[in-house]
Structures are given as structure tokens and as C-alpha cells.
Image (cartoon, grey):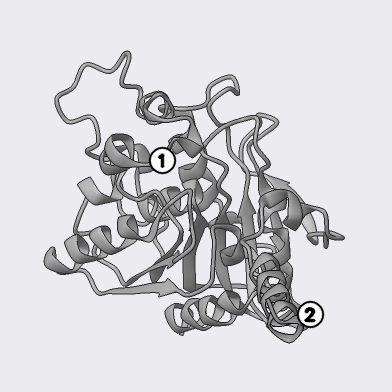
Amino acid sequence: MKPVLGLALAASLAGCATAAPISYSDLLARDRPKADVRIAYRPLPLQYGELWLPKGKGPYPLVVMIHGGCWLADLPGTELMDYVADDLRADGIAVWNLEYRRIGHEGGGYPGTFQDVAAGADHVRELAKTYPLDLRHAVFAGHSAGGHLALWASKASPLRGDNPFLPKGAVSLAGIIDLAAYRETGPDACGGPGTIDALTGALFRKTQDLYGGLSPAAMLPLGLPQAVISGDLDPIVPPRFGAAYAAAAKAAGDPVTELNLKAAGHFELIDPTAPAWVVIKRELKSHLD
């Protein structure tokens, strides 16, 4: 191999290595910004949210943010969303970043995980009594398992309770938004079918409609604008899941924007320094307007 060609190949390989998708450990290794205030929406230790407030008088449009982590207790929680929450705060958008009980926490899985997210989302009405939030311009957004919960919470259902607070739009970032499809053909990154079964209560619920009222794909139409955003390098929630859901949602009559972002993995979608975030933030703003 000629020296110049060898150097060019080495540089190319180095560039590919640099472009490899980040992990959540890479993200959390950075200095982490802090929310303005932590507020309980119910009395249990994990039933809280963190509110990120822009400077100024407001009122501010609001993103209700729901973290991922495979719905599992042993993976990180709200801290995963701190970086994008801070970026939105700096851009004049308030963020209510929800924590909730997960599989492995007492009361997590079905129905506790859903009940917590419902209660946390509805708590924005109480927040608006104290903080300058414009609830007429509110979007639910979530990443991975949180993408599932964000879309789920955007439609009235029995577990959403009476008179639920519903957003103008919903944004799924690499969301697991078809539980049945992910259980059947998804990678084992979240623990395989057992995780989905724990989330839905499959081992103890006696129903023929296991996913009805729990999986956005089984609840279509949701009746509001949605953005379904994937990374084309995502090994955890490959973009085929987002594409299939978006097609089904459109067929059911929902207005859906589907984006497959190039050179983005799973966690680039919640990295405000990644090129993907420019596109995602633009989409969030379009739903808030």
C-alpha cells in the first residue's frame, strides 16, 4: 500500500470511529445542568418531576418530557433528558421532566408506570397555578420507552383517568410505540419479550386485548399531530418500527411527520450537541406553535 493511500485510509477509518453512535454513558459523562425545581406530583419517592424554566416573565410553552430506559428500574432516569431540557430552557421553552416507577420498582410496570405518567402529565394544571406556563401550547415528548409513554399519554384512555390533560401534539424520539411488534421482532436490548410482558401485565391480566389502551399502535387514531423520529443507526429501536407506526397512524387519519435522521443512533436524539437535535428541536417548536 502506498504511504499516501495508507494515510488516507487511516484517516477515513478514524473518522468512522469518531462517528460511531454514542451510548448513554457517553452522554452522562458530561457535566450535567440542573433543573430549577423538583416537585412531587404524588407522595411516593419516584413520583416527581423536574421543572426547567426559561428566564423572563413568560408565559412559556411547555414540553412534558418523559425519559426512556426500557421501562426498567436499573437504568438511568430523568438525568438522561437533562441536556435537552437545558437546551430548550435556554430557547424559551419550559420543560416538565417526569420520573415514574418502572419495572423493578415497587408498583412499577402495569398499572403503576402508566398511572404515574398520567398523574405527572395532569399535574401541569397545578404547576400553572404557580409558574408561568402556557398550557395552550404544550407538547408531550419522550425518548425510547418514554416515546411510548408520551404518545400513550396523549390520548384519553381508562388509565389516563378522568379529565386528562392532553397536549397539542406528541413527539416520539426512537420510541417503542408498537409494543406488540417490538415484542415479536425487536432486538433484545431492553430484555426481550419479558420486559414487554412485565410492562403490560401479561402474566396476570386476563384479557384478550392485551395492548388496547397501552400501546399507541393499538390505540390509533390518537387524534392529534405527531412526529415520529428515528435514527438510521439505532440498534435499540431500529427505524423500521417508527416507519411502520407512522404508516398505520396516517392510514387511521392522524397527521404524522416521520423522520429518519442520517448518521444518528439511539442517544444522538437526546444529545443537544448532535446534528439530529437541530431537526428535532425544530419539530418540537412546530408542534408548540
Label ID, residue 134:
none
Answer above or below: position of 50 versus 167: above
Residue, disc 1? 187
Type of amino acid under label 1: Pro
User: Residue 218: horizontal and vertical position, in percent?
Assistant: 21, 46
Quadrant in which residue 57 is drawn = bottom right
Task: Kindly state the secondary structure of the residue where label 2 is placed.
Answer: loop
Task: Check whether the beta carbons of the residues at disc 1 and disc 2 lie within 8 A of each other.
Answer: no
- For residue 55, the mark is 2
Task: Check disc 1 and report its element: helix, strand or loop.
Answer: loop
Q: Amino acid at mark 2?
A: Lys
Q: Residues within 10 Å of mark 2 (few under 14, many from 20)?
A: few
Residue under the point 35% across and 50% down:
177
Question: Residue 121: where, in percent of width, then height?
Answer: 50, 52
Q: Which sits earlier in the primary sequence, circle 1 or circle 2?
A: 2
Q: Is residue 161 visible?
A: no
Does 160 sit above or below residue 137?
above
Please state, as top left, top right, bottom left or bottom right, where the N terminus lies in the image: bottom right
Q: CA distance from mark 1 to mark 2?
A: 42 Å
Q: Nearer the viewer, residue 70 or 254?
A: 70
Q: Relative to 155, is 266 on the left or the right?
A: right
Q: In this rendered view, identify the residue nearer to me: 206 or 128.
A: 206
Q: Residue 276: x, y in percent?
A: 56, 75
Q: Residue at 35% of width from left, 37% of height from top?
A: 159
Q: In the rendered view, would you say 168 is above or below 126?
A: below
The answer to whether 257 appears left or right of 49 in the picture is left
Q: Nearer the viewer, residue 56 or 245?
A: 245
Residue 110 appears in view: yes
Give the side of residue 252 with respect to residue 181, left or right.
left
